């Protein structure tokens, strides 16, 4: 007997958001009290050298950097609050009025790529698409980019079972070249041949992203409200099938994302049009320049030559929109769920993700920054500049603490650890407001995430061509240069990494006064006396 599935009936969210009482229950309050109590006890009982007359200079340096970074964090939080509580509610009311008055898009297009996803995940994704089309009451088309006949058969058979009478077409685009970018490029070319209208709306989504109920009905009318709006992206949550700590890490990152996205959206731009789910007006998507940038985006580098991007298609679409001055938006109450299946202890997957994300930011940040503050709101341009600076400034405090502990007294390291425990918990209190759950491990995970992220960026900045995408069939970059040329490139990358890290450590030593610079006049006098 064929199993009957009714995806059109209302379904509960995969992850129910906790209400205030569940999220901030008595146990959490006690845990926070004990946490700060232990920090206070550590400050009073353990050797505290922060205000030692001989060491207070180093405390001022760390404190000044911290004040700058925490001030920047506070700026994002305040802007996020303004957008979430005042600006976006007005946008939402206009959208609801347009939708309730009967406006509907002519057609909804879903650009979906998949690569050997688990059957349960694919079926849940298709089920959510069907439900959203039924709720919108308009015709739809799923443009499926695939390289595996098994994936295609799964989608075809499932659609025949659950939506045989729905006004929904499925067009399968079998890619003839590997990679997600090529799949998207082929889909967009097919769309342009099928007379997709400029005002049609196209949903870009991954094959592991599940739409929450009402996601599209919150997004679509916003394009009608504002004719200048060209693209938007939505909120995300994660369903992690893997280690608990990995799930907490992702939950924390999504809380950070909500703060940053709302802050950026206050300026009418975002810093990424997330590949998990973004909605575009078809006007730009039909242009050859957009398609070529997406499928063959590349960078000319003085060391690595001309190389193509593997991942980061969402950064390419974002860069195109940024370059054309397009209005972009973040919709905080439109939600979807990313399914992350993590095998093993998760550490290797975490490092791969951070390296891929960091590489995408670095490969696109410089050219976006080069557009200048006149091509975008100044705050957005400054955010791009801050991404460049933060990977170095984040490393100053831990390096200085280790140097002081080595050259002066190890007790300074104890004081620094207490300082990190207190400040990262204060930052986590902001994250808790945007997180689905409250985890006392946030301060530790936040600090390690910042430290690892900065270190990986420093490593990647000299190896921009090195790319690996483990969850897309193990794609990795290839180097067509000769053997000796590759050795030279790798040697130069290692040399520059060591050189810049040495400069960083030397600058910290000299600026903090841990070592003094030699007297140049005296040095020259001694040298010339030898002649």
Image: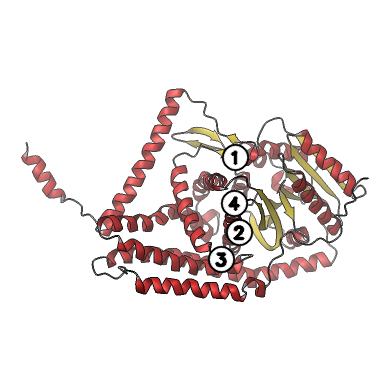
The answer to which of 8 and 96 lies nearer the viewer is: 8
| Quadrant assignment, res 226 | bottom right
Q: Earlier in the sequence, mark 3 or mark 2?
A: 2
Residue at the image point whose x is 80% and y is 52% from the top: 129
Q: CA distance from mark 1 to mark 3?
A: 29 Å
Q: How is the image coloured?
A: secondary structure
The answer to which of 220 and 21 lies nearer the viewer is: 21
Q: CA distance from mark 4 to mark 1?
A: 25 Å
User: Which residue bears the numbered disc 2?
Assistant: 251
> Residue 465: percent from the left, percent from the top?
51, 36
Quarter the N terminus occupies = top right
Q: Mark 2 and mark 4 in contact (Cβ < 8 Å)?
A: no
Disc 1 packing (10 Å; few <14; some 14–19; many ≥20): some
Q: Eyeballing the image, is 463 above or below 105?
A: above
User: Which residue bears the numbered disc 3?
Assistant: 431
Q: Eyeballing the image, is 85 above or below 345?
A: below
> Residue 418: percent from the left, percent from the top?
40, 66
Q: CA distance from mark 4 to mark 3?
A: 28 Å
The answer to which of 50 and 256 lies nearer the viewer is: 50
Q: Eyeballing the image, is 77 above or below 377?
A: below
Residue at the image point whose x is 72% and y is 67% from the top: 92
């Amino acid at each position: 007997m064929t199993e009957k599935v009714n995806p059109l009936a209302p379904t509960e969210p995969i992850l129910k958001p906790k209400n205030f009482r569940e999220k901030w229950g008595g146990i959490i309050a006690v845990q926070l009290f004990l946490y700060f109590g232990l920090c206070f006890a550590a400050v009073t009982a353990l050797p505290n050298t922060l205000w030692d007359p001989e060491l207070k200079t180093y405390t001022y340096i760390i404190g000044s950097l911290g004040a700058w970074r925490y001030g920047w964090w506070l700026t994002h939080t305040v802007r996020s609050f303004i957008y979430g509580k005042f600006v976006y509610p007005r946008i939402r009311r206009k959208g609801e009025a347009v939708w309730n008055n009967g406006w509907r898009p002519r057609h909804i297009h879903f650009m979906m790529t998949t690569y050997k996803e688990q059957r349960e995940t694919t079926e849940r994704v298709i089920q959510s698409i069907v439900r959203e089309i039924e709720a919108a009451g308009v015709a739809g088309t799923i443009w499926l980019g695939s390289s595996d006949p098994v994936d295609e058969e799964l989608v075809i058979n499932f659609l025949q079972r659950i939506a045989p009478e729905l006004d929904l077409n499925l067009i399968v685009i079998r890619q003839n070249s590997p990679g997600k970018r090529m799949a998207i490029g082929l889909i967009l070319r097919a769309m342009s041949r099928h007379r997709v209208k400029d005002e049609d709306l196209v949903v870009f989504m991954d094959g592991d992203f599940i739409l929450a109920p009402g996601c599209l009905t919150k997004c679509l009318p916003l394009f009608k409200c504002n004719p200048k709006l060209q693209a938007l992206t939505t909120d995300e949550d994660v369903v992690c099938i893997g280690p608990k700590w990995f799930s907490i890490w992702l939950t924390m990152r999504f809380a950070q994302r909500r703060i940053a996205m709302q802050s950026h959206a206050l300026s009418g731009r975002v810093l990424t049009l997330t590949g998990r789910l973004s909605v575009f007006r078809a006007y730009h998507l039909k242009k050859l320049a957009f398609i070529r940038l997406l499928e063959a985006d590349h960078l000319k580098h003085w060391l690595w030559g001309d190389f193509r991007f593997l991942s980061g298609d969402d950064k390419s679409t974002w860069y195109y929109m940024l370059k054309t001055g397009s209005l972009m938006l973040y919709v905080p109450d439109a939600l979807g769920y990313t399914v992350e299946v993590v095998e093993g202890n998760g550490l290797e997957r975490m490092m791969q993700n951070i390296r891929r994300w960091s590489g995408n930011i670095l490969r696109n940040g410089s050219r976006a920054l080069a557009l200048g503050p006149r091509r975008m709101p100044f705050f957005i341009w400054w955010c791009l500049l801050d991404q460049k600076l933060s990977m170095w400034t984040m490393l100053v405090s831990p390096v200085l603490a280790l140097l002081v502990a080595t050259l002066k007294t190890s007790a300074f390291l104890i004081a620094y650890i207490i300082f990190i425990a207190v400040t990262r918990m204060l930052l986590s209190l902001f994250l808790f407001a945007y997180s689905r759950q409250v985890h006392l491990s946030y301060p530790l995970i936040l600090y390690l995430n910042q430290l690892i992220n900065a270190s990986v960026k420093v490593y990647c900045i000299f190896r921009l061509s090195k790319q690996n995408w483990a969850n897309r069939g193990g794609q990795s970059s290839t180097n067509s240069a000769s053997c000796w040329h590759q050795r030279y490139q790798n040697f130069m990358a290692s040399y520059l990494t060591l050189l810049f890290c040495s400069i960083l450590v030397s600058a910290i030593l000299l600026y903090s006064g841990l070592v003094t610079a030699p007297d140049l006049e005296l040095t020259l006098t001694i040298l010339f006396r030898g002649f």
